[in-house]
Image (cartoon, grey):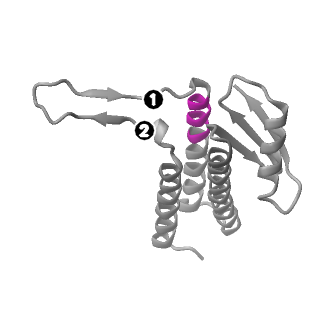
Amino acid sequence: MINKQNLWFITLFSLIMVLSIYYLTMSDDTLSTLNVSSDKGEATDVVISEENDTLVALRVADEEQLLARMEELENILLSDVATLQEKNDAYEELQTLNKTEGEKDAIVKLIKDEYKLDSVVKIENNNITITIASTTHDALLANNIIRSVQSLYDKDMYITVKFS
């Protein structure tokens, strides 16, 4: 049986792990760069790169959904009225969510490294939906991305590539 101290440790560790992976896989293009000159009289230039609004909206919606589900599962784990089976199921689902987040980050990193494209990945069971930040709709590129992502898995996955 899981006691509260172990549950809090697992919960906080999982949250830290997800956030760490997110920030480690964040590209330099999405971060702001600050150019400061050595002269005190000169103005400071701040350059902020623009990222596709659609991708940002998809990421935010996905993060909110994930955090809401994780909070629900944590409430079940900490509940006094939940049965042992419900707590075990919630714990297993929490582990699955963490594993899925790791897979998403690996796919985003793969696409960024191989194809130099920003993307958002959504995984549901055997379905993987990849949204690419590109104005050109290239069937060959989509096929290559599908093949690269499928190589990460042993079983067949249903992979969809969308361009925005």
Q: Position of residue 72 (x, y in %)?
A: 59, 49
Q: Position of residue 76 (x, y in %)?
A: 59, 57
Q: Is residue 55 above or below residue 154?
A: above
Residue 15's disc is none
Q: Position of residue 39 (x, y in %)?
A: 12, 32
Q: Residue at horizontal 65%, vertical 30%?
A: 133
Q: Position of residue 155 (x, y in %)?
A: 87, 60
Q: Which residue is mark 1?
A: 49
Residue 31's disc is 2
- Corner quadrant of residue 119: top right
**Left of 103 or right of it: where is 43?**
left
Q: Residue at horizontal 23%, vertical 34%?
A: 36
Q: Report the predominant secondary structure element of the magenta stretch.
A: helix
Q: Residues within 10 Å of mark 1 (few under 14, many from 20)?
A: few
The amino acid marked with disc number 2 is Leu
Q: Is residue 122 above or below residue 14?
A: above
Q: How many marks?
A: 2
From this viewpoint, is residue 107 visible? yes
Residue bounds of the magenta highlight: 55-63
**Quadrant that contains the N terminus:** bottom right
Label 1: which secondary element: loop
Pointer 1 with pointer 2, Cβ within 8 A: yes
